[in-house]
Image: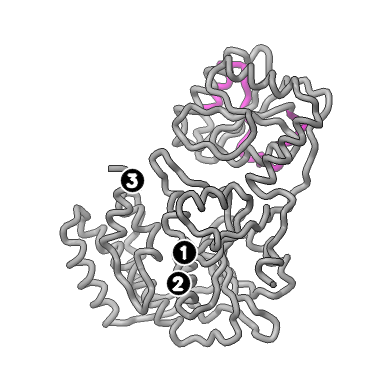
Amino acid sequence: MTDFDRYKSLKEKFNFVYEGICLNRVLALPIWFVANGGYNFSWKRIALAFLAIDVKKMKFNPQRNTILSTYGRYVRKDHLELYNTVLKRLDEEASYNNSLTFGWKLSVHPIVICQVLKFVFINLRDTSLSLWSKWKLIIECIHYCNIIEELKYMDFTGVQKYLCQCSVLDLENLLTQFFKLRNIPTYSLQEGVYFIFKKNPPLDSIQYENFETDNLLCWGQFSVDEYISYGISPKRLSLAGYPKKVELHTMKKDNSYKKCMVLIARDSFQATNMKLLEMLSKVSFNCCFELKLHPSCDLSYYSEYARNCHMHVIPKDVTIDECLNNIEYDFSIAINTTAYYEALMRGLPCLRFYDGTFDLMSGYKDVFETLEGFLECLGGIRSLAEDEYQKEIDNVLKYAIGVEIDNYQKILCK
């Protein structure tokens, strides 16, 4: 049984509904980790059963705003920047709420506690979950029921639309369900390139399996097409465009293709990373390869390997934004990362190594698996006229991530 299968099985059993809100959808992330034995839950979190996020701190001014918006409880600087960037486009139509600033309040509901306890010990009694794992779900469930109790007595007069950063998870999933029950249209931003996983779906598959919002604001047509193929109605998918501020660069002229940045995948793809590096080590006398590691990678391990193979490792404190450019580098190679698109936007030709262990995203004809394939692929790009290659890349970026498309105000403020 795969991780995805275990998740689906437990989620179906944990079909607890409170005030019309499906808690197994709110708790999709904890359910995934409990089902697959990876949920770190300290004793301190038991206090959540007697607390609620203080949602009464949500700001909405009906004199100025028509859209109530929230940024969920994610400690991700890059995602917060996306949220901020989109809200600046909306001319104060949307209220600003970073839920990380809401704080907590005491919220004790004995009837809720009894209902959740009864449900879990009856409906999950035939599972292989330990008693501690069941208590993890009980505490999380009671906590979100406490939040529902707080929301019930709040006045949302004047709210015409609800916009969130990610309607799939936690508080924002709860709020999305809450407003849907009140016939208020809901919208959600996209945090990356969304597509359907066909090979042993990972945690990221929750993005479409637990799809909640009335309207997902997709970056590019690629994500729209992928979600339609999964069975999500096109009426719930809007082409919004790439929200980040980006300065597009054209491919540099007279490229020597002598210096390459290798964009190493996360630590779970170490076997794939090493296949590529062993391949490149055979041509490292012809080309200078510099490795940009994913934050999860072991710096000492890759540094030692690089020294032995005439390669270099870029210091971890140097960000991709700081070093990914076509002045310092001639081309790049990516393994299963959206930094592939970042390279292309910066005018840096980028090839993709693929060994069949993951799902490929949309892109150019730049995929290779063998050393011969690498040399052939690189030669094919070098032989193209610069304006021809640029045109192909422009089409890739527009389709895959919506570069130079900006429909946020049109969609949300119409």
Q: Earlier in the sequence, mark 1 or mark 2?
A: 2
Magenta segment: 301-329
Q: Is residue 318 magenta?
A: yes
Q: CA distance from mark 1 to mark 2?
A: 7 Å
Q: Which residue is mark 3?
A: 3
Q: Is residue 299 magenta?
A: no
Q: Nearer the viewer, residue 144 or 251?
A: 251
Q: Residue at x 52, y 60 (%)?
A: 74
Q: Earlier in the sequence, mark 3 or mark 1?
A: 3
What amino acid is labelled 3 in the image? Asp
Q: Which residue is mark 1?
A: 212
Q: Residue at x 45, y 54 (%)?
A: 231
Determine whether, in the image, residue 27 is placed left or right of residue 345: left
Q: Residue at x 62, y 21 (%)?
A: 311
Secondary structure under the numbered disc 1 in the rendered image: loop
Q: Does residue 50 lie above or below 357 as drawn?
A: below
The image quadrant of residue 90 is bottom right
The answer, for residue 327, to whether it is visible in the render is no
Mark number, residue 391: none
Do the residues bearing badges 1 and 2 touch, measured as CB atoms within 8 Å? Answer: yes
Q: Does residue 112 lie above or below 15 as drawn?
A: below
**How would you rate the neighbour count of disc 1 (Cα within 10 Å): few for under 14, some for 14-19, many for 20 or more?**
many
